[in-house]
Structures are given as structure tokens and as C-alpha cells.
Amino acid sequence: MSLYALGLNHTTAPLDVRELVTFAPDTMGDALRDLLARPKIKEAAILSTCNRTELYIHGTEPQPVIAWLEDFHHVPKDSLAPYLYTLTREKAVSHAFRVASGLDSMVLGEPQILGQMKQAVRDAESAGSLGLVLNRLFQRTFAVAKDVRTQTDIGSASISMAAAAVKLAERIFPSLADQRLLLIGAGEMIELTATHFAAKNPKSITIANRTMERGRQLAERFNAQAITLTEMPDALPQFDIIVTCTASTLPILGKGLLERVIKARRHAPVFIVDLAVPRDVEPEAAELDDVFLYSVDDLSNIVKGNLQIRQEAVVQAEQIIAAQTHSFLRWLEGRAVVPTITAFHGHHEQLRASELERAKKLLQNGTPPDQVLEALARGLTSKFLHAPTQALNQAGDAERAELVALFQRIYQIPDEH
């Protein structure tokens, strides 16, 4: 059984490809169980974010899993091939460590990905697809990410997508204090966005969410108003800035709806940031003259332009990851010999039980205990040495030399030559 990771991310696939293979939270359990039902897949976990979809597998070779991914998302056969990467063993382990540490993110050093990986593990545990190997991998991954963040400055200059959205809004509007803000969704990204925008004291903040309870909880933290998604279309014309990030599989803001919004606003500009994958806003809305629409890929350029991470911190992080990767592989290689060790113990346990039973019978027949102990010791010694001695006697010259060297190492016999 092999360990590998396969997937695509913001460096290998454009947004319109990434959104084809995202896993909605309510489908994750079914997806994992369906994947685990495939032949020779022992363990599986899926990491699905706006910037990446990755499958971590302990089991069969990658090709059947790639076929499963295409089939599950109903995409044409081989259409994902130009964008996919497959990383095995050492590269897969190192990749997991780099992802959790923020070294492989669109925003270098960003912390959100660690929480997303922990959620992927919880999903796998709930679906029953997480076993010994992947559990050990992810627990080590979380420890490595903690070491990277505490021992380096990798996250000190991180500029999040939420912060980038604020910077971009400030380029379009002279003052955010005069603007009305709508946040669609109530997840971690929207919460982070609300924090950054609230620091700029916008004229008002409104949170639209599918459930009023979750939206109201978030709104109370930022002195904001809460509405439901069904109320949102009628309220849209009053907002100057819209940031959306939901788990919807279909757009919730279409071009037609935004055309009506612009008309109602008498062509006052609307700034929209779509942080969702799949996208919450129809891409065609960007064609409207008074709509300034930006996706996660658009914001990445702002992030890169403002990011100044010291190279020393990256080097330090890579050194930590390299050392921990080597350590995990040693453990993984040790797992490969477990069946042999188990069989070895089982074989000798049978010999021990046989000699012990013989000794008990001797005692029952009245044989003196010291003679029984002597016979037991001799019997065990003879049986334990029978197989190695026979192998030496039957080996050819070259093989015998190898066996002699091996037995000297195992039994710590000094080389008299």
C-alpha cells in the first residue's frame, strides 16, 4: 500500500477549473465513503478550499482515484490531467507539512489553511476513512505547522485575502466611512473580512446568511444588521461594497440581478469581492460598466504585491519540514515490516508453547524440576537455532557470507577474522 496526495491548486489550475472539483461540506461524508468503497483504498481524506482540492490516500495507485474524482464531479475523462499533480511518499508528506504551514498558500504564511486541514481530518474521522497512517500523518502535520509558526517569522507579514479586499476597496472609494457594506455568508472568511472592514468604520455593515441565527450571532459582534438570503435581493441596491463567500454550488448573484441593482442605484458603482469557490457571482457580471468584480485569483496579485516575507523565515521553515518529513518516513518504513515482525513473533510463540507443554507433561510424570528446566532450556535453544543453522548449511558460498554477516549483527557475535 502506498501513501500519496493528488489534486490541483491555485498554481496549477485556474479558478474555472478549481470550482469544478470542489466538495461542498454536505457532500464530503458521502464522497469519502464512496471513495473508501473502491478496491484497495484503505484510508482517504479530502482537503477542499477555494484555492485547492487535494486527496490524501493510503492505498492503491493514483489512476483509479483520478478516475473517481472525474466521475464524482461529472467532468469529462482526462480533462483534469493538465492541472493535476500526484505526489508520492516523501513528496506527499512534505507537501502536507508545507500546506499546513502556509508555505503553499496563495497568501504565503496565512493561518486559515491549518483550520481547513483540521476540518478535513474531522470529516474523514466522521466518515470512517481515517486510519492509522493518515491519522499519524495529519497529527504530525499539525505539530509541524505549530513549530513553523512559533520558531519562524513566516506568518508575521501575512496579508490575508480579507485585508486585500479592504485595500482594493480603498482604491475605489475615497473613504470607506461613507460606504455601506454587505457580507454574504457567515463562515470563517466572512468573519475575518468583517474584522478588517469594521476597523475602517464603514457607514453600515449588514450580514446576509441562509440561517438568521448564525447571521445574527456574527452581526452582534460587529454592531451589524442581519438579514436572510431571501431578503437580500430587495436590499442589494443600498450597498456600495459586497463581499461574498458561501458554500453554494450555484451563483447567488447573477448578471441580470446586478443589472437591476445598478439601475436602481442610478449607476453608482458597486464593488464586489467574490471569495467563494465555486463562485457566488456570475463571471459575466464583470461586463457591467458600474460593477467592479474581483475573484480570489484577482486578489492574489494584490497579496503578492504587498507581501514581504523574509527569505530567512522561509528557509527556516523548509528546514523544519525537511527534518520532520525524514522522521515521519522512518516511522512509515517501520510500518512496512510490521507484518514480518508479527509473523516472527507468532512463529517463536508457537515454539515456546510447544516446549512449555512438553515441560508440563514431564512435571506431571514426576520428572525432577531441575531436569525439566534443563530440558526446557535445551529444547528452546535447539528450536530457536534450527532455522538459522539450516539456512547456513544449505546456503551457497556468497549467500553464506551474507548470512554470517547478518547473524553477527543480530546476535552481536564478534568477527574473529
Image: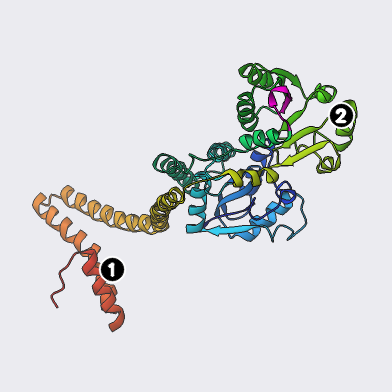
* Left or right side of 93 for 190: right
Give the quadrant of the C terminus.
bottom left
Q: Within 10 Å of the Cα at label 2, are there few (<14), some (14-19), or many (20+) other Cα atoms?
A: many
Q: Is residue 367 magenta?
A: no
Tell me which residue sits at (53%, 47%) in the image: 99
Disc 1 vs disc 2: which is toward the camera?
A: 2
Any part of residue 206 in sight: no
In percent of the image, x 65 and y 16: which residue is there?
223
| Span highlighted in magenta in the image | 173-184
Looking at the image, residue 395 lies above or below residue 24: below
Side of 208 where 91 appears, left or right: left
Q: Which residue is mark 2?
A: 261
Residue 266 in percent (x, y) is at 89, 27
Lateral position of residue 23 relative to residue 103, left or right: right
Which element carries disc 2, helix, strand or loop? helix
Q: How many marks?
A: 2
The residue labelled by disc 1 is 387
Viewer-side residue, 221 vs 74? 221
